[in-house]
Image (cartoon, rainbow, N blue to C red):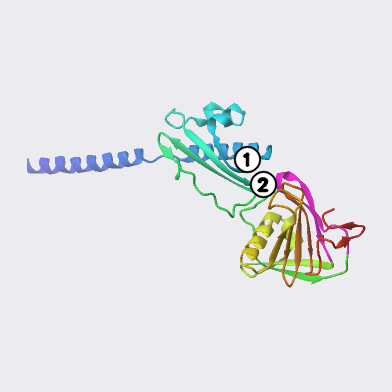
Amino acid sequence: MKNKKIIIFILLILFCITGCKKEESDSQVDTTKYKELEQKVFDSINNHMENTRQKGGVIFESDFLISNGYLKSDDLIDNQGNTCNIYGLSENIYDKKCIEVFAKCSDYQTEGYGKWVPIDKTCKNIREYNPNEIEVSSINLKSGKFDSKEILEFETYRHSKAKLYYYNLSKVEITDKANETYDLKELLLENKLSMEGLKLYLEEQAKEDKLTKQILNDGNPDDGTRVYRNDDYTIIMCNNSYWFEDVYIGPKEMSFYSKFGNRKICE
């Protein structure tokens, strides 16, 4: 009889353990579907922003995305068959933009849902930015003979084409924070650095008073052609109202009025 009680006691313990494990496994949610849903909404907002010049902070509700054909109602169904509440925030400022997506489903919720979460001000242009870009530490110039021909053509914001020019230079070298040195032309061609990434570095240097920044009155307010200059170089990023186009790099003596053949910079 005593052995029988022991066996029953052991069985009860085993039952509790397996029951607890089952309950624990049932509480785990497969978030794959929700990550895919957030990505769909992200892509939908991005597609909309590519086709509009809307600026500033914008909230995109799912109803708007559905009514404009970016999403289908079925895209918002969660694992329990219920409709998720989902929206996106977009911060679109001329030549850069950020998008954050938030979802609330019956068994899943994005952290920060229901709040206006401050979007990272160092966000990169998502069409141009590569998350594996190098982080610029310094820019070094190699002197050379003047040549008015472009160094290369690159893609800018909204898929516009722009050109890179060197003024009395043979080469521009970029050193990253790991102290590795690269040819700027090769970095751009291999998508290891974008012009937006270079601009972010220059903006940081300007904030730290390590170079001067001048914004010319030829674009939107506070976003015209930018002239960055220190004791070693001048970098001019041309602007035609909504995003920078051609980029000119030269020694500090180069100015906005320097001539490239028969034309001036940014013409």
Give the mark count: 2
Q: Residues within 10 Å of mark 1 (few under 14, many from 20)?
A: some
Work out whether mark 1 precedes mark 2 in sequence or the reverse, and give the earlier one.
Answer: 1
Asked whether residue 136 appears in the rendered view, the answer is no
Counting from the top left corner in percent of width and height, residue 169 is at 82, 67
Q: Which mark is residue 240?
A: none
Q: CA distance from mark 1 to mark 2?
A: 9 Å
User: Residue 59 falls in which quadrant of the image?
Assistant: top right
Counting from the top left corner in percent of width and height, residue 19 is at 27, 39
Label 1 sits on what residue type? Asn
Front residue of 67/127: it is 67
Query: Compared with residue 193, is residue 100 higher up or lower down, i.e. above or below?
Result: above
The answer to if 169 sits in the magenta stretch is no
Residue picked out by circle 2: 127
User: Residue 266 falls in which quadrant of the image?
Assistant: bottom right
Image: magenta residue range = 147-167
Q: Residue furthest right?
A: 262
Q: In the drawing, does residue 170 fall left or right of residue 191? A: right
Label 2 sits on what residue type? Arg
Residue picked out by circle 1: 46
Query: Compared with residue 17, is residue 178 higher up or lower down, i.e. above or below?
Result: below
Q: Secondary structure at mark 1?
A: helix
Counting from the top left corner in percent of width and height, residue 64 is at 57, 30
Quadrant in which the N terminus appears: top left
User: Residue 70 falls in which quadrant of the image?
Assistant: top right
